[in-house]
Structures are given as C-alpha cells and as structure tokens.
Amino acid sequence: MSKPVVISVQDLRKDFMLSHSGVASLKTLVLKWKKPSLQKLEVLRGISFEVRESECLAIIGRNGAGKSTLLSLLARIYRPTAGTIEIRGRLAPLLELGAGFHPDLTGLENIFVNGMILGISKKELEKRLDQIIEFSELYNHIDSPVRTYSSGMSARLGFAIAVHVDADVLLLDEVLAVGDFDFRQKCARKIDEMREQRKTILMVSHGSTDVERLADRCIWLQNGVAAMEGDPKAVMEAYQQNSTNTPGL
Amino acid sequence: MLAELKALWQYRELLISMVSRDLKIRYKNSFFGFLWSFINPLTTVIVISYIFKSVIGQPIQNFSAYVLAAYLPYMFFSMAIMDATGSVLANLGIVKKIYFPRETLPLTSIIANFIHFLLAQVVFFTYLTVLFILNPKDVPFQATTIYLPLLLVISFLLATGIGLLCSAVNTFFEDVKYIMGFVLQMMLFLSPIMWVAEKMAYVTPRRYLLMELLNPVGVLCNAFRKVLLAPTPVNVNFGDTPVASNIPGHGPLNTILANHDVAMPALPIEWGMLAYTGALSLIVFFGGYWVFNRYKWRFVERP
C-alpha cells in the first residue's frame, strides 16, 4: 500500500485515576489529603498502528478492553498519558448515538449545533441540510425536540450529520448496531461510498458481519494491547474462539 | 495560550450559535420574555430605593437611578459568574462525547449575560429619560457617559476571568458554586450599591480603601454610577468622633456639631482606583484562562 498515512498512533498509553469516594468536594480533598483514594487504572498500555487513506479499520474486543477509550483519544476528548496521535485532515467522531444533542432543541437546530461542533460553517450546513434530512429519514420529525426521538431516530440523525460534514476521517463507535435493517444497509452503502471518496474510517464493532463486510483490517484489543492484527475474518474468528473458550470476564 | 485562542477562533460560529441559543431560551416569549427579565432588577431597585431613602434616610435626589446604575453591573457579575461556574459541569455529558474548545461553555454564559447587561443599559437610559420628563430641571445624561465602553471592557474581562477560573475548579470541587453564591451575596452589601461611596469614603477612608482594593466589583459598580449620573452632594454624618483635616468648602471640622449631617461634595471618578481594577481584571482574565487551560483536559476524567 502506497497511500498516505492518515492516522498514526505511536505507543499510545492512557491511565485513569479511579476514585472510590465518587464525590468531588473540598471535604474529600481535605480529609483525603494525605491518602488519596485514587487507584491507577491502565486502560491502554502501548498501542501503535497506522491507518492509510480510504482504509477502514475495525477494532474489536471485550467490554473494558479500551476500544472506546481509544476512539475518545483519537477524537481529542482525552489527552494521552504517553505516546502520540497524528491525524491528517478533519475528524468526524460519532462516539454515541446523538452525542452532543441538546434534548430540548429540535432536530433541525441540533443539526446546526452539532455540525458546528464538528467544525463546519453555518453556510456549508445550510447547503447540505436537505441531504442530511433526507439521509436521516426524519422528514416530519425534524422540527420536533430531540427528546421525543427514539434511540434509532437520534442515531440516524447523528449518523446523517457525521457523514455529511465532509470530514476526512470518520470514527464510529458501535453506531451501526442501532437502527433497523434498512438503515444499516444504507449506512453500509454510505461507508462504501465514502471510501470511494478516499475517506478513512475507524470503527468499533461487535457485529461480525459489519466487521467482515466493511473493514479492510481489524485489530483485536485485549487488556489494553493489540492482541492480534490483520485480516478481519481471521481476527474475528480468533476473537470469537477466545471468547467461547473463556466465557465471562 | 495563542494556540488555544486560535482554536477558539475556529469555533467562533459555534460560540455565536450557543450564545444566541442561550439568549433565545431567555427571551423565548419574544417581547414579554424580554420584559420579564428586567422586572426583577427594576422591582429590586424600587424596593431598595424606598427602604434606603424613606426608611433609613439617604437623601439624594433620584436615588433610585443611582441604585439602578450600580445594581445593573452587579447583576451582570452575579449572573454571569454563577452561570459560568456551573457551565462545564452541566454540560459534562457533551464534553465527554465530543471535542470542541471547552472555553466555549463558560464563555457562552458570560457573553450571553453581557449582551443582557448591554440591553439592561438601554433600559437604564430609558429610565433616565423618564426621570428627565418627570423633572426636567436636572439633566440626567452626563458627558462622562463616553467612558462607559471602558467600564464595560473591564467588567467583561473581570467576569470572564472569574468565570473561567470558577468553572474549571467547580468541575472538581462543587463547593465553589456555593462559595461563589455566598461571596457574590456579600458583594451586594459590601459594594456601593445600596449606599453611596462618599459616606464610607469620608467617614472611614481607610476601610473604604480596603473595600476598593479587595472588591473590584464594588469599584466598577461605583464607577458606573459616577460615569452615568450627575455628581450630587451627600449628607454625611461624622458621628461624634473627631475628624482631622479640612474638607473643601467647609471650615475646620470641630466647628461641625457632633452627630449632625454635613453636606459633602461628591467624589470625582476614581481614575487611579479604576486603573488598578483594570490591571487586576487583566491579571484575573489571563490567570483564569491559564488555570482553565491547565484543567480542561481533566474535566472528562473527573473522579
């Protein structure tokens, strides 16, 4: 592959401080001054990978393996404890259904707020408004407050915005798991189309069909390190084998 | 800090839309919604004026205008700082899910309240016009009103600095919200809003200086009053303590009977103190922004 590297992650580490008190107050600070009740939790312990242009990389792994942390780090929500992340071009993270939607605003108003959060200008959004509404299939509901939406509806709207902001890199965190069959088909077609437009996609998924159908490459994350990397089918098989052998956590 | 400001500039449209959303929610019912948000300060000022003029005795003409001139900036500080303090915590859900410059959250609160404050100034001038119509003898509009933008800039910087600082710290220690509520409540009494600065300045000049040094909000409230309204002599009661030094326009103080009111000239605009407050506001602004930038990456990892 000679295509340019779009995402470059070098020896990425992320620690979290686990608090047992759970309450943030001056009282806990004063009382626990000498013995902080914080415990270090290493979520990512040194991950390196590269994603090239128009590639689709899938990340699989058990709950708590660090998949979502990895995506959040790429989306600049967390700052890495160590290591570097380099991303060329604009990023459209879709980390949760309707992330950043304001429940009291209408779907239309949320398109603007969310679009601007993703770094696109109001003018551009107005141009793409029809496309977004059409893709989300929310025609009649677009003027209703988002709190009246079903989870599938807000996921559709979120996905519609993220794919229409003309980002170079798309981060998807299990967003394909919601929505009905038709919409998932549509999303898959859209992802294919985006890859033809040389967009790069990084997705976290549990669905083996999604991974095998969409991804070029797959990384299996286990205990904060990449346990296996390579062809989606092979990695998925190994992962499922491992899961059935050691059930539970 | 330059890089941070550059990132913020890229997201200016987001900031604008968030501010307009904030104001839209406040003025939802268009004209009446707008009106309602001024009924609170107006009734407060009327009550304060009545109590302090008729019951306690603060015989200044148009005292209500003097109260309003100082109360409106106080309202701005109080509301902007309280809104900003809780802004990051209230939006933690979005902060955890999506990247955007975190400063936009407290800045939205400050800017929305600042615009509200500007609108309140319009209401204030309307109020002055009404007073003028009722009593055309005293000219309400002052030439010194041209200094108003300067005061607005200083107020904005100070509120932004405190707002950034408090919103960052409040994310980890929610006590800040209660402390600020208490401090701002105290500032209402410790600032020359319900009383005139002259009384304190003449009788206990050192305490007055201390108040001004520690309370930039008080200095600004007084400066708004001085800039917007005509200087009026103030009746000061020196009590029975002997006061040294002569006061312009008066004989030696010992000729004044103890416990008698003396009409004292109004103090001029305190430029020196204003310069100090301006410098302090700049320090608070950059200091607050610095602290905010230090903590903003840890908001999402809040224990």
Image (cartoon, coloured by chain):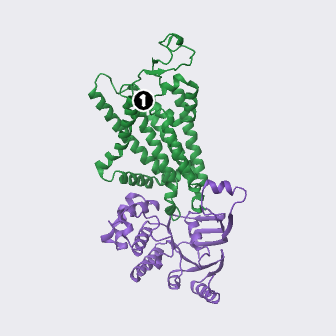
- Image point (50%, 63%), residue name: B93
Q: Quadrant of the C terminus of chain A?
A: bottom right
Quadrant for residue A144, please give it. Answer: bottom left
Query: Who is closer to the viewer here, B74 or A21?
Result: A21
Compared to B140, does B24 lie above or below?
below
Q: SS for tag 1?
A: loop
Residue at 59%, 74% in the rendered image: A67
Q: Where is residue B85 in the image (x, y as percent from the top left)?
A: 51, 51
Residue A22 shown left or right of residue A33 in the figure: left
Name the residue that disc number 1 marks.
B56
The correct choice, above or below, for A113 with respect to A47 in the image is above
Residue B246 is at least partly visible in this image: yes
Quadrant hosting residue A139: bottom left
Chain holding disc 1: B
Q: Which residue lies furthest to the right in this view?
A: A34
Q: In this view, does B211 lie above or below A217?
A: above
Tell me the kind of residue under disc 1: Ile
Residue at coordinates 37% horizontally, 43% vertically from top-left?
A: B40
Q: Where is residue A95 in the image (x, y as percent from the top left)?
A: 51, 70
Q: Quadrant of the N terminus of chain A?
A: bottom right
Which chain is painted in green? Answer: B
Residue B27 lies, in percent from the top left, at: 34, 51
Residue A4 seen in this snapshot: no
Supply the letter of whichever chain is purple.
Answer: A
Q: Residue shown at 45%/34% (left/top)?
A: B193
